[in-house]
Image: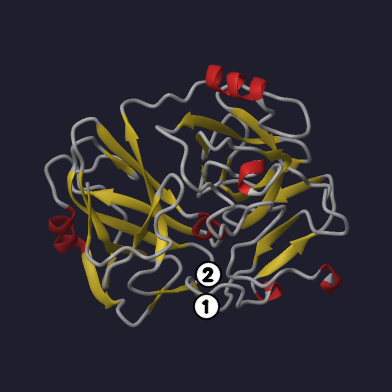
């Protein structure tokens, strides 16, 4: 089903997904696109490419630009097996808009059953310029047998067996509701971070290398927050979330009924996230938030997204928290690229 241009990395296979690796070159293009039902991505690229970039030794991808990168993984799916992709958690927390495209695609991040062909990443850094290279992993892909089984009835059933959130009221309607924390549940800590514009470069493969205050402005305790248009925020949910080892969860990325903003570019929650079997008893969802056309007032406790749950075909041998996971037991946490934030540095 999966063809690799190079042998898999040791930690490339996750509990319910496969990380996707960038290939050796990137193409700067004039605009984002979908190839449509009669066109291959490579043919479309020849029409709109601006220049080619060598990623073998690393290259800078600038903010506001759109890049197409052939991936090192390609697929030959059998009938009845489809796939879906999404940005990795660290990608979303850096505001790197990343989507996967296939030949003949009419939707981003969707791979139809029986698809045979290459995979491409569309990458557009929104806030920070990034340094990426061949083998960098910005996206992940999950494989589905048959139709989606995500329903509210399933969530009710799971919650009856073991609470899916460990505090607050349970609201299940088109998914499990999560609300935003703007009163700092963590003692003396900020309620969120606002990204600084015109910051330095971020190397997507280096962990704990950057000082938080060089890139982020902490947001301190308050009951409401005005989201500025096209500004990027990292916030956290009030609720501590659990995902049973037998299931995975996904955040609904945008719901215009709750406000004119988008939440969670990287919306996948692995089996065992916040769960005792993965080394945790609930973990808060980190929310990647961007307002749209107008300023929007976000209130403490306001519903900001919903989680849907799906069963796995079997329980993984190792779940989230047992595979060197970066965000198990997390509270409000920036991406793995930043050093721990010292609250004593409060201005």
Residue at horizontal 64 percent and vertical 61 percent from the top: 334
Q: Nearer the viewer, residue 343 or 325?
A: 325
Residue furthest out toward the front: 317
Q: Is residue 240 left or right of residue 82?
A: right
Whether tag 2 and tag 1 are in contact, CB under 8 A, the answer is: yes
10 Å neighbourhood of mark 2: few (<14), some, or many (≥20)?
many
Tag shown at residue 128: 2
Residue 171 can be seen in this image: yes
| Residue at the spot of label 1 | 201
Residue at horizontal 58 percent and vertical 70 percent from the top: 337
- Secondary structure, mark 1, is loop
Q: Earlier in the sequence, mark 2 or mark 1?
A: 2
Residue 50 position by quadrant:
bottom left
Q: How is the image coloured?
A: secondary structure
Residue at horizontal 29 percent and vertical 62 percent from the top: 68
Q: Is residue 22 left or right of residue 302?
A: left
- Secondary structure, mark 2, is loop
Q: Nearer the viewer, residue 333 or 29?
A: 333
């Amino acid at each position: 089903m999966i063809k690799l241009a190079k042998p898999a990395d040791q930690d490339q296979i996750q509990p319910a997904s496969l990380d996707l690796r960038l290939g050796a070159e990137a193409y700067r293009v004039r605009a984002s696109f979908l190839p449509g039902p009669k066109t291959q991505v490579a043919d479309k690229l020849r029409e709109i490419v601006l220049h080619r970039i060598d990623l073998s030794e690393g290259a800078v991808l600038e903010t506001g630009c759109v890049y197409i990168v052939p991936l090192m993984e390609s697929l030959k799916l059998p009938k009845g097996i489809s796939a879906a992709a999404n940005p990795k958690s660290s990608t979303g927390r850096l505001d790197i808009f990343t989507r996967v495209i296939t030949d003949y695609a009419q939707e981003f991040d969707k791979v139809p059953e029986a698809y045979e062909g290459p995979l491409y990443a569309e990458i557009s850094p929104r806030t920070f310029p990034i340094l990426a290279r061949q083998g960098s992993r910005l996206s992940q892909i999950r494989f589905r047998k048959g139709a989606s089984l995500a329903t509210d009835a399933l969530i009710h059933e799971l919650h009856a067996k073991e609470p899916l959130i460990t505090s607050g009221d349970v609201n299940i309607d088109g998914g499990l509701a999560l609300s935003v924390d703007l009163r700092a549940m963590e003692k003396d800590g900020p309620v969120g971070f606002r990204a600084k514009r015109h910051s330095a470069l971020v190397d997507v493969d280096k962990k704990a290398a950057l000082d938080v205050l060089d890139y982020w402005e902490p947001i301190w305790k308050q009951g409401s927050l005005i989201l500025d248009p096209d500004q990027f925020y990292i916030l956290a949910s009030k609720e501590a979330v659990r995902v049973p080892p037998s299931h995975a969860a996904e955040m609904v990325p945008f719901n215009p009924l709750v406000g004119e903003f988008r939440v969670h570019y990287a919306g996948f929650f692995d089996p065992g996230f916040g769960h005792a079997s993965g080394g945790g008893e609930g973990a808060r969802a980190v929310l990647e938030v961007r307002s749209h056309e107008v300023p929007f007032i976000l209130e403490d406790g306001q519903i900001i997204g919903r989680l849907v749950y799906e069963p796995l075909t079997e329980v993984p041998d190792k779940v989230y928290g047992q595979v060197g996971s970066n965000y198990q037991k997390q509270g409000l946490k920036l991406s793995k690229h930043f050093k721990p934030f010292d609250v004593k540095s409060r201005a």
